[in-house]
Amino acid sequence: MIMVDPIITALLAIFAVPFIGAFLVGLDRKLTARMQSRIGPPLLQPVYDVIKLLHKEPIVVNRVQIIYAGLHLAFMVLCVVLLALGQDMLMVLFILAFSTISLILGGMSVRSPYSRIGSQREIMQMLSYEPILILMLVGVYLVNDSFMARDILASGKPLLLSLPLIFPAFLMVMTIKLQKSPFDFSTSHHGHQEIIKGITLEYSGPFLAILEITHWYEIFLLFFIVTMFWATSIPVGLLIAAVCFFCEILLDNIMARLTWPWMLRFMWMVGLGLAVTNVLWLYI
Amino acid sequence: MNCREKSPWIVHFNCNSCNGCDIEFLACLTPIYDVERFGIVHVGNPKHADILVVSGAVNYRNVRVLKNVYAQMPSPKAVVALGACGATGGIMADCYNVLGGVNQVIPVDVFVPGCPPRPEAIMDGILQAAGLLNVRQEDRNAGAEVRLTIQPAGEPEKV
C-alpha cells in the first residue's frame, strides 16, 4: 500500500468521492434505461439534477429537518474519510448508522404522514441489515485479529476466501442500501409518484440535493467495502465490484418490490443464516 | 443556467380532465417516447418539481387544489396546459361549474393544443417550458414573481 499524507487522503475522500458516486449513479440510470430498451439520460444527468436543485428556491418546512439533512451528509462524509484513512471498521459502521438515523429523524420531524411512513420503513430496513453488518465485522476480526480497515488492506490473503458466505449476505445489505428492488421500501430510484418516495417528500431544492450528494458518498462507501473483500489485488477487487454493480442493476430491473415483513424474514433467515454459518465456521 | 433546461422535473395535475390527455402524457414515459433521455422525471411531488403539467378545464371544486399545488413548487417554475380544455375549457367551457382554461387561475407558460395532443407535442411543450425556466428565474431576481392568494378552506374561491 502506498503511504500518502492522511490530510491529502481525507481531502481526496471529501472532494473526489462525490464525482465517482455521481458517475456510478449516471451509469446506473443509463444501464437501467438500456435494460428497459430506452435510450436513457446523459451520463452526467445526476450532476445536472443536483446543480439545478442547488439553485432552486429553498423552502423550509421546519429548521430541525434541515439540520438532520446536514447531519445525514456530515456523518456519511465522516464514514468515507475514516474508511479512506484505514480506521476502525466498527466505528465506520456506527457512524453509518448515525447517518441513517439522522435521515429517519428528519423524516419523523415533519407532520406529513407519508414522510413518517417512509421513516418507519427506513427503521425496518436498518433492523434488517444492521445485525448482518456487525456479524461481517466479527468475521473480519476472526480472520485478521483487528477491526482496522488498514489491516484488511495490508493482509496477504483475500478476505473473500475466508468469508465466502458473508459476502453474499453483504450483497443483500448492499441491495437495501442502494435502494434497489426487491428491497426499495423507504426510497427508490423509480416510482416517484408512490409512497416509497415518502422519506424525501418534505425536502425540496437544495436540501433534496444534500440527500442526493449523501447517496453518492454512500454508493462509494459500499463499493469500497466490496473492493476490500479482495484487497490483495486492486484490479481483481474492482472487477468484483463492477460485477456486483451490474448484478444489482439487473436485480433491480427483474425483481418486483416486495413487502417489508418479507424483507425482514428474508434478511434474518437467509442473510443472517449465511453470516452466522460463516462466523461459526471461522470460530471452529 | 444550462442545468435547469437539462433536468426539468414535472408534476402532473389532472383538473377534471377526461383522461385523454393524461393517457397521452403517460405515454411519454414509455420506452417508445422515453422522456428520461431529456432528463425529464415525473416526480409526482410539487416540492421536487420544476414544471407543472395541467390537463383539463378548471372548475370551482379544484381551483383551490390547483393553486395549492402551484404554490408548493419552489421557484423557478413553469406551467404547461395540455389540450383544448387546458387552453380554453374546450367542450366543457359552457358548463355551469367550469371556470375555463388553466390561465384563468395560474400563469401558464406553454399551451399544448389538441384533443388530446400527441405525445410528441407534449414533449415539445415540456421542453419549451424547460427553456423558459431561466426567464422565470430572471423574473424572480427582478422581483416580478407571480404570487397567488389562496383563500382559507371553507370560503368561496374568488377568481
Image: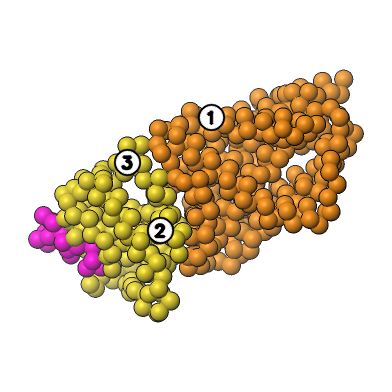
Q: Amino acid at mark 3?
A: Tyr
What separation in Å lies between label 1 and label 2 (alpha carbons)? 32 Å
Closer to the chain start, of discs 3 and 2, is 2
**Which structural element holds mark 3?**
loop
Residue visible at 53% across and 29% down in the picture: A251
Q: Which mark is residue A251?
A: 1
Report which residue position mark 2 lands on: B5
Local crowd size for mark 1, using a 10 Å CA cut-off: few (<14), some (14–19), many (≥20)? some
Residue visible at 72% across and 32% down in the picture: A235
- Which chain did the renderer colour orange? A
Query: Which stretch did the figure color magenta?
Result: B88-105
Quadrant (top left/top right/bottom left/bottom right) for the C terminus of chain B: bottom left
- Residue B43's place in the image compared with B130, above or below, is above
Report which residue position mark 3 lands on: B33
Closest to the camera, between mark 1 and mark 2, is: 2
Residue A16 spot, x, y in % from top left: 67, 52
Chain containing mark 1: A
Local crowd size for mark 3, using a 10 Å CA cut-off: few (<14), some (14–19), many (≥20)? some
The foreground one among B58 and B48 is B48
Is residue A88 in view from this perspective? no
Q: Are marks 1 and 2 on the same chain?
A: no
